[in-house]
Amino acid sequence: MEFIVAYSFALEWKVRDMYISDKVDSLKGIGPKTAVLFEKLNVETIDDLLRLYPRNYLSFDEPIAIGEAEIGRRVTIKASIQSYVDVKKVRSLTLVTCMVKDGSGSVKLTWYNSPFLKQVFHIGQTFLFVGVITIRNHQLVMEHPEYYTVQQYEKLQSSLQPVYPLTEGLSNKVVTKAVTNALPLLDQLVDHVPEQVIRQFSLMPLKEAVRGSHFPENMEKLKECRNRLVFDEFFWFLVHMRIMREKTVKAENRFPITEWTAVEEFIGHLPFSLTKGQEKAIEEIRKDLSGATVMNRLVQGDVGSGKTAVAEMALLATVKNGYQAAFMAPTEVLAIQHYESVSKELEPFGIRTELLVGSTRISEKRKIYEALAAGKIDVLIGTHALIQDKVCFKNLALVITDEQHRFGVRQRALLSEKGQDPHVLVMSATPIPRTLAIIMYGDLDISVMKDMPAERKPIKNCVVGPKYRPTAYKFMGEQIKQGHQIYIICPMVEASENVEAENVIEYRESLLEVFPDNIRIEYLHGKMTPDEKNTIMRKFADQKIDILVSTTVIEVGINNPNATVMMIENAEKFGLAQLHQLRGRVGRGDAQSYCIMLCSTERKEAMDRLEILNQSNDGFYIANEDLKLRGPGDFFGVRQSGDLLFHLGDIYNDADVLKQANDAIAYLEKEQYPFEELVNEEVIQGVQL
Ligand code: ADP
Ligand code: MG
């Protein structure tokens, strides 16, 4: 009896003691050191851990016949042991070899330093071997294959093993175990999506979806689970949009902007004539700004279509009519770039421009806050720093956000709240098909700039294998001689065991060996401090760097018309839209530009995908082709849009789920559901926007 009491007490104690909101180190087996590592993955609480979804799953393929194995590709074969295991000493190594065969051919298996295998493999037994097949001395060889008994393999084949995003020092095994230990707390997870939506759209219960995303039974089930999670992301996004629209759409225009002579003058002084798209966009903006209700407009134009000039005209008009304006960019580098061009181009018109970014010194910030409130600054340009509490405008009439897809709706709303119903202009290069645009930007009118500046030469593209690298370097050398600059993009920052991707730091070192000493090579990546990044970008803009080796931090909006070559390593690892954005960093001036996509796999699908980019420089065309090409099985791996807005969802890949979420909103609207109630503090905490 005593024993039973003690036992049930222990159980109770365990249940009561743990909450989903507890820190991860309250889980068994996670100490403070591991907790610090988890923090690097933005995982602090158990809840966060449960929402740390695998980035991939290992599945065990059907074995294929040896005779059909593709050389150089990882395959599974099912074969019987044909020869005695041979153990040989080669210098300090022990080399173990063994011949295996199936009905279609034979392969020589080799291992190093594993003499015990002699006891494992016996002639006539069948095993499954997983590895890469190569040819050596006219003989098929598999080096260091993993091996499984038939039984073991069958068991593995029926399951999917999660592969988590990792950080140095944190292994997949540890994360998997931690998640396993956290699963019982899933019961505490609250589903905030209204009951009737769950019923009406037959959504899978949230708990089941979370559980199944970690440990799916099979691919089909995984897709269902993931769809539910993606639904949530889209749903909450759309709820916020819907609330925003209600607030803004019918607001009266408190800041009529009717005086446009300065803009005419500005256009007259431009070193180029406006494209049709630019003309149309500014005309629409002008109508909005002088109209009866407040402007809410998206200008969508492909990379290099000249959106900044359109923004500048809107800024100029606003200030000339006696108001202030704000211009927000997603990164410091981009904010600085905008600041430099806007201040230079608008200064002749007597416009006072200031820059406010995270790394602005405190004393400087204070001065800016004061001047802003006193109306001594006309245009404030910056990053998220603009939406901080201390920033108060005197009479903010126009808010522009660049590369809008990088900001959540909430940030956009916060900036608008800096004024009293200011006009809103958002600019985006994300080439998104119209049907999706209407959902994503439901609260905005849309101007599309389809054409490119006339004298711009189309970028020349090529998709090549790693063998082409030396030729590419030689070509770069010639471009540099002509005074041009080069970007090289690598997917990763530091070498990592798990990803066979080139990385910027080592890559730069290897380039230093290839190029002569007078070629200046630097690197840039997301983990550098803002100051370091700014310094590098400054030097690149001033043409003090010839080759910039960078991760995708470069992708958003950077404008250096002197750069003519963009080489992308491991191009197959990027989404099409992202590649298109990257490519958009060149071809921004008069000189012929080139984009070299280096593909390190010869897989047909990868090549086909890249071929779309090879054939076209038109972002809208690419987005549409991409949609056609993609099959339903393609739901993790490459994120097509490269947008940070959603963690799991992808507006292209998950277009059907996006539509479903949109239907859910329409359904709630019909039911006259009180949307405001949906977005209380508690809900917002669980939803990332
Ligand atoms: P994005 O639309 O990608 O933001 P930008 O506004 O940065 O493009 O413009 C890219 C480059 O094109 C800039 O150097 C800009 O000065 C130039 N540009 C903009 N409009 C025109 C035009 N109508 N004709 C020629 N060049 C232009
Ligand atoms: Mg831009």
Image (cartoon, grey):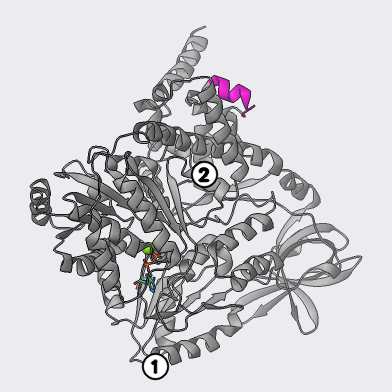
Whether residue 355 is situated above or below residue 184 in the rendered picture: below
Q: Which residues are magenta?
A: 195-203
Asked if one can make out residue 243 in the rendered structure from this viewpoint, the answer is: yes
Look at label 2 and name its amino acid: Ile
Choose between 681 and 466: the one closer to the eye.
Answer: 681
Choose between 170 and 480: the one closer to the eye.
Answer: 480
Whether residue 25 is situated above or below residue 205 in the rendered picture: below
What percent of the width, then of the height, locates residue 349?
A: 17, 65
Determine the image quadrant of residue 218.
top right
Instruction: Name the side, left or right, on which 222 lies relative to 339.
Output: right
Q: Is residue 51 magenta?
A: no
Whether residue 139 is situated above or below residue 162 in the rendered picture: below
What percent of the width, then of the height, locates residue 67?
A: 86, 70
What percent of the width, then of the height, locates residue 166?
A: 47, 53
Do tag 2 and tag 1 residues touch (Cβ < 8 Å)?
Answer: no
Look at label 1 and name its amino acid: Lys
Q: Is residue 197 magenta?
A: yes
N-term mark: 2 or 1: 2
> Residue at 52% across / 55% down in the picture?
641
What percent of the width, then of the height, locates residue 597?
A: 55, 74
Instruction: Name the side, left or right, on which 435 lies relative to 643.
Output: right
Q: How many marks?
A: 2
Mark 1 = which residue? 481
Secondary-structure class at tag 1: helix
Q: Whole-Å distance between the Cαs marked 2 and 1?
A: 47 Å
> Residue at 39% across / 93% down in the picture?
481
Mark 2 = which residue? 438
Closer mark to the observer between disc 2 and disc 1: 2
